[in-house]
Image: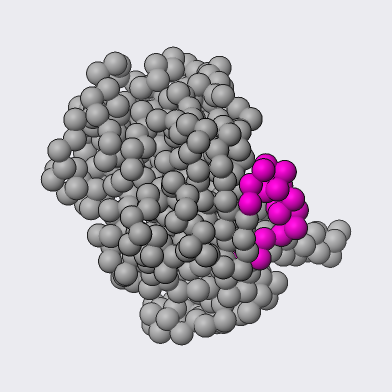
Amino acid sequence: MKANKNHSVAILGSGESGMGALRLAAKHGLKIFLSDSKTIPVHKQRLIESMGASFEEGTHTLDRLINYDEIIKSPGIPETAAVIVELKKAGKSIISEIEFASRYTDAKIIGITGSNGKTSTTLLTTHILKEAGLKVASAGNVGNSFSDLLVDQSPDVIVLELSSFQLDGVIDFRPDIAMILNITPDHLDRYNNDIELYADAKWRLIKNMNKGTHFIFNQDDEMITKRVKSSELSCDKLQITTRSKTSNGAYFLEGYLIFDCEKLIQIVPIEDLPLLGRHNQYNQMAAILAAIQLEVPFGDIMKGLSTFKNAPHRMELIGYIQDIPYINDSKATNVDAVYYALDAMTRPVVWIAGGVNKGNDYAQIKTLVKNKVNTLICLGTDNAHLTEEFRNDVNILMEVKSAEEAVTRANELAQPGEVVLLSPACASFDLFNNYEHRGDSFREEVLKLKKDKEVVKA
C-alpha cells in the first residue's frame, strides 16, 4: 500500500539502500529525515538537501526519529543495534528498504536468496528474460537498490537478489516467484551464531506467498526441505535436485537437466549450460524454472543460456600460465561455496584461501581437501584456523600477506596438470576492501605474471 503524501519516514543509513529510499520517498512527496551514525559525504548531503529532506550525521537522535511515522532501516544495521531496540520500545514501525520499495510497483517480482549462488542466478534469470524480449531489470544486493530502480524505471518484471540482511524488516512484501537456493552457515555473527535465526531471515522471503505464486527450492538442502515440510505453504512448490527425479520442478539425470512441470517437459544437455560445476546446475535449474513460470518459450530460454556471461569473481577463469589455469573465485566467502569450487575441480589444486574467519567449520571440505589439494597458500593476517585445520591434509602449506606474493608462490609451486584456485572461504577485510578488491588484485597479479612470462619466452 502506497503511503499518502502526509506520511513521514526516517531513513537510517546513507548507503546504497538508504539513498535509494530517499530518492523514492522524495519522488512520492513524503516528508523525509535521514540519519546516519557515520559521516555523510558532502555530495550526499547536497543530494539530501536537494530532495527537500533534513539529515543528521555522526549519531542517531532518538527524540527526532520517533517523530516520524515509519522507520526505513538500511540492511547493514542489525536488529540488535541500540537505536533499533529503542525505536521498537517506542512502538515505531521499522521496515526494510525492500518492503518500502515494493509498495511502489505493480511489476512481477522474482525474489532470489540463498547463502551462495544468488548473484549468478539473478544475473542469469535477468539475462534469459531480457533475451526473450521482456521488459526486465535486476536490483537489490546486485546493482542498484530496489528503491533506486523504481525512481527511474517501470519494468514489467523485477529480479531481486536478496540477502538475509535485506529480508530483516520484511512485513508484507510478497514476490510472485521466490527462490531459496541453499541455506548454509554464513553471517552467523549477526544472528547470535544460530543458524536457525539466519534461516528464519531467509524464510521471510516466502512468508506472505499464496496461491498463484511460485516457490522454487533446493530439495537437496536438508534445512530447506525440513522447513518446507513443517510449513503450511499454499503457493506452488517447485523442486530442484541433482539426486533424484521430481514430478514438479527440475532434476539432473545422466548428463541432462530435465524440466518436468505442469506446463511442459524439456531437456537441456549440460554441455549447453553456460555455468560449470554441480552448484551451478541448481542455479541454472532455478533460473530456467522461473522463466518457464513466466511462459517464456523454451527456444528463447536456450538462446539466453547460449549468450550468458557470468559476473567476475565467481569461478572466473583468468587465463593460463605455462598451461596451468588460474581461477578467481573470490566471491566464495564461506565454506559451502568453497566445497562447490573444489568439487568442480578436475585437476590437483593449488588452493589460495584465508582472510577474516566467520566462525567457519571446515569439516565438510576435509575430504575434498585431502583428495584434491596439494598446496594450500593462506592469504590473510591471521591464518591460525586454516593452518591448524589443514596442516596434515596437504603436502605444502605456506602463509602470505599479499595477492602478489600469493600468485608468485602459486606459480613457483604449481606442477604441470594442476590448477591454481583462489577460493578464500573467508571475508576479505583484513587485507582488502571487499571480495571484489581481493579478486581484482588477484586477477591483476596473474595477468602481470602472464605477461612477464610471455616476454621472457619471446
Is 367 drawn above or below residue 120 in the view shown? below
Count of numbered circles in the view:
0
**130 or 193: nearer the viewer:** 193
For residue 98, what is the image quadrant? top left
Q: Is residue 51 left or right of residue 282?
A: right
Question: Which span of residues is magenta-colored?
Answer: 38-54
Query: The C terminus is located in which quarter?
Result: bottom right
Image coords of residue 201 (percent x, y): 32, 52
Q: Is residue 50 magenta?
A: yes
Q: Is there any visible trace of residue 280 in the rendered image?
A: no
Image point (33%, 38%), residue name:
172
Residue 70 in sight: yes
Residue 288 on the magenta segment: no
The image's colour scheme reads one colour
Q: Is residue 44 left or right of residue 191?
A: right
Q: Position of residue 440 (x, y in %)?
A: 67, 59
Relative to 249, say whether 318 is above or below.
Answer: below
Q: Position of residue 41 (x, y in %)?
A: 71, 59
Q: Quadrant of the N terminus?
A: top left
Image point 66% across, 70% down: which residue? 403
For image coordinates 66% across by 65% down, the residue present is 39
